[in-house]
Image: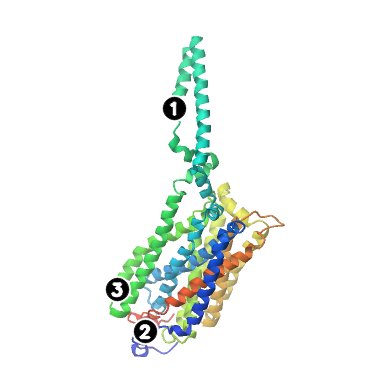
Amino acid sequence: MADHINLKDLPTEGERLDFNKVSRYAVMLLGAGGIGLIVSIILLFIPATQKAYGFSWLLGTVFFFTIAVGGIFWTLLHHASNSGWGIAVRRVFERVGSMIWLPGVLMLPLFLISPVKHSLWHWTEIEDNANDKAAQQQTIDNYQAKHDALVAEYQETVKEATAAGNLNEAKMAEAEIAKIGEFDESKIAGKIIKDKDAILYGKHGYLNQPFMWARYISFFVILTFIIFQMRKWSTTQDETGGLKLTFRMRRAACGFLPLFAVAMTFGAIDWVMAIDHHWFSTMYGVYFFAGSALSGMAVIILVVTMLRNLGYLRKVVTVEHYHIMGKLMFAFVIFWAYITFSQFFLIWYANITEETKYFLIRNTEFWNYASIALVVCHFVIPFILLLPAWMKRTPRYLAFMACYVIVVHLLDVYLMIIPMRGPIVASNYVIPGAIIGDLFAVVTVGCLVAGGFLYSLRKYSLFPCRDPRLLESVNAHN
């Protein structure tokens, strides 16, 4: 255990990043990301590439969305659980979570470019076709013709029955005419959707584009507000000190957690699960969350290690903090495996057609090997390598495992999204060249997020320098 640290051993005003140490990296990252963004926008508008690259861009934005979501979760959990050890690294939690707005902005083209939107979320194409005036008029004419023909048929039956003196048959035909009623043109869009996709018609109260836009905006507003407000109170405490803001952040975190859960869960449903709007899983939100929390902690470990290598946090973050962060990462490796198996087992046991499609695709040909690799690499290997305590107490080793976890989490997100891009057959299990676009999109979004993150580090102290419980955290032991 390290020597006991007193307040006089710590910088009074905290530690601020000397941006000159990382400025060239930030400029390079943002420059590369900017070039990649321009190329990506072009690819999203070119008819030959836009549909395939739309999936690539969704992969990149969702992947970094999950990492930012992880940062928000650890910030809220730190306060809600009244954590003492986490104070030393709380500012890193906040900074990782504060990047949530960038994936949200970068995701916008996917909703604005119609061919891309239609290829990703096929239900939007069905809805747009149903709202097309020409298609509506054609359907109205067809329905009206069928309506008029049916009414005329029953009217003829009434005439013939009346002439023959069969009053009961005439009354029954008149009753059928009354049931038919007048054709309601105001509901024509719903009729088109129902004829095209009965399952979508049943879900149309949720899966409609005005509501989708409202959810998209509200989710990112909620998540951004939560983390920025928590960060504001945290940095204000650097100036004022005292316990008032500590209690305020604790109460707020307890209230924010349900909002966070709703925004994160339904965001996963809207942007990933709804790629196949026929498929559903009640555990999908938790599955998405498990990977987010795990990858978020992995990035936090890497950031802390980077700052220590630059000469910061040396007296604030100790081996004990690495041990705790390693244990949390280990715990979520197990939690991810538990949720993943539970989702698969329940769907396999129920054997409902609308639920099994997801795994039928991912257990076929190439994707089956990728799914097996995911289980081994996402659970078996990190479980074994993170089990010994000494490994979790070794910063370099833990940083290596954090990198590994991020890579396998990318594979996890890849398998959530990419298999729905095209048909899977033995001779052509992926679209030729699409994997290059996938990597390009991930690198582009990664450069923009990493560059923006480095810029965000320069403004405030790298640890909460006037938190009343700072010494408790610095001298944490487990």
In the depicted structure, whether residue 268 falls above or below residue 407 = above
Alpha carbon separation for disc pair 3 and 1 = 65 Å
N-term mark: 3 or 2: 2
Q: Which mark is residue 245?
A: 3
Quarter in which the C terminus is drawn: bottom left
**Image spot of residue 70 (x, y percent):** 46, 68
Q: How many marks?
A: 3
Q: Is residue 56 visible?
A: no
Q: Nearer the viewer, mark 3 or mark 1?
A: 1
Q: Is residue 127 visible?
A: yes
Residue at figure coordinates x 42%, y 51% from the top left = 211
The answer to whether the residues at label 3 and label 1 have Cβ atoms under 8 Å apart is no
Which residue lies under the disc numbered 2? 14
Alpha carbon separation for disc pair 2 and 1 = 76 Å
**Image spot of residue 347 (x, y percent):** 56, 52
**Image spot of residue 127 (x, y percent):** 50, 46
Quarter in which the N terminus is drawn: bottom left
In the depicted structure, whether residue 139 falls above or below residue 46 = above
Alpha carbon separation for disc pair 3 and 2 = 18 Å
Does dot 2 land on a helix, a strand or a loop?
Answer: loop
Looking at the rendered structure, the kind of residue marked 1 is Gly
Which residue lies under the disc numbered 1? 181
**The quarter of the displayed image where residue 5 is located:** bottom left
In the depicted structure, whether residue 461 falls above or below residue 66 = below
Does dot 3 land on a helix, a strand or a loop?
Answer: helix
Q: How is the rendered protein coloured?
A: rainbow
Tell me if 401 is positioned left or right of 304 in this view. right
Does dot 1 land on a helix, a strand or a loop?
Answer: loop
N-term mark: 3 or 1: 1
Looking at the rendered structure, the kind of residue marked 2 is Gly
Q: Nearer the viewer, mark 3 or mark 2?
A: 2
